Amino acid sequence: MHPIFQRLIDVKWRYFRLEAWLDILPNVLMAIFYTILACSVPQEVNKFYSPLSENWWKIVIEVIFVVITFNEIRKEVKEYYRSKKQSSTFIKWRKKEVERDLAFCHPRWPQERTFVEQEMRRIKQDKENKRTYFSDAWNYIDWITYAMLMVVIILHMINLWVDDNLYNDVFVRILSCTVIPVWLRLLKYARPFPSQGPFVVMLDHIILDSAKWLLVILMFYIPYAAAFWIMFGPQSQIPVKGYNSTTSLIYTMIRIPLLDDYNFTGLEKAAPYMSRFLCGSFIIIAAIVLMNLYIALLSNTFQRVYDNARATAAIQRARLLQDLELDASAKKRRRYREYIKTNYSPEETDYIAVLSEEEEQTRKQSEKVSEIHNIVSKRFGGKKFGKLERSEFDSVLDDLDMLKRSHGEMKRSLSLLASNLEELTRTTSLILEDRKRVGQEGYHDQQEEILKRLNWTVTRLETVYAIDNGLNPGQPLRNHKANQTE
């Protein structure tokens, strides 16, 4: 979801949060009051209010409970008609848009007209928008709960006037079963809240995945149940308690993977080897393999749908805020628009506040890297000095850089010296050739002396700088005999 819409939902939630709590509070009170009344039912239901001096509080709780129940039914009916009206308004708007597109279809592209006509037929059929209200499965749970509550109220009134054990038994059973959906429906009203909403949304995905897992586990439960029925059922040679009826067999098969009491002693007496084989293999498959498979499935579902569940919970919150805004008075809506205009039009906020989780994690990693850099600088940087606060470590780096530059300059100087030596060598060769050509004795002796001195100088320079054709200059050999003065 875009950060701007997330922020809008957060701002509206901050403004209408009290109304949201007031919307869930009656349902919580209804569940609490119904549980108190159900737990206080005596064995003889017609004596529910006697003596009246001690049980008058039951009448007060019943009146409050009935008022809240009928008020919630009124809200559900109102929500149904509102959803129907919104659906009808959307259909009219959509028809108008499609009819406008139909007027601009060009004859050159007939497929465009075909698509628009198909869209018109789909809108007229209205297969999707008719189920807008009941597309939410929690609305079915609401109406089932209300129907059960109506039955309980009617049976309670009958028990007050008719002393019949049949009505009493039916009333107690329905009363005990109704407590469960009365509390479960509170999850519907917890969806818009930021902390509980994602987990309630994930419950839908978990139920669907559990249904898939149930199909797998039935492939093992059915054959094992048939095997236990054949070996230890009522038609076997030695029937065993817990396996001699259908209902008891189903309940016992559920208890075996939980390592509960499944009457293994009776099974061992009836068929020692078959009982060990059936119970052992069923425990390994059901308690170890299938149960761990189910846990892994739930873990995968949690990781897969958590982000989507958060977005879905935000959408549920936005839907609730829309309903609360529509139910608010004109004065309340006017104050809300003034509140938005005054405080959030525009809103000045930190950029980090609208970052996604990935960007927030990257920001935290950058902060950690900066912190490590500061620690290293303090540990190895030494004292800081100068206007720019340069550390001793930075000064060492500068000295190394200067030494590198000096080495490069020396290398270039030595290369230039090698070139001069080569030129000097070529000049010596020319002088030798000239000596041979002239062939004069006096001149020969003089040139011979000059050449010796020149060769001695070249040899000394090559030895001192250890030059290899001017490409790899080395260090001077200070202790070499050629480097010693005569």
Image: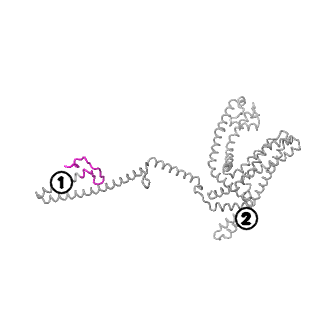
Q: Which residues are magenta?
A: 461-486
**Residue drawn at x 14%, y 60% as measured from the top left:** 437
Which quadrant of the figure contains the N terminus?
A: bottom right
Q: Report helix, strand or loop for mark 2.
A: helix
Q: Report helix, strand or loop for mark 1.
A: helix
State the CA–CA distance, disc 1 to disc 2.
114 Å
- List the residue tagged with mark 2: 92
Residue 218 quadrant = top right
Is 247 drawn above or below residue 110 in the view shown? above
Neighbour class for label 1 at 10 Å: few (<14), some, many (≥20)?
few
Q: Is residue 240 left or right of residue 449?
A: right
On the image, the x and y values in percent for residue 89 come to 73, 63
Q: Nearer the viewer, residue 405 or 202?
A: 405
Neighbour class for label 2 at 10 Å: few (<14), some, many (≥20)?
few
Q: Nearer the viewer, residue 37 or 426?
A: 37
Answer with mark 1 or mark 2, whichever residue precedes in sequence: 2
- List the residue tagged with mark 1: 453
Secondary structure that dominates the magenta span: loop
Residue 260 quadrant = top right
Mark number, residue 464 = none
**Residue drawn at x 61%, y 57% as measured from the top left:** 3
On the image, the x and y values in percent for residue 416 come to 28, 57
On the image, the x and y values in percent for residue 108 come to 63, 70
**Residue drawn at x 70%, y 37% as measured from the top left:** 224
On the image, the x and y values in percent for residue 90 come to 72, 62
Q: Nearer the viewer, residue 240 or 259?
A: 259
Disc 1 marks which amino acid? Answer: Arg
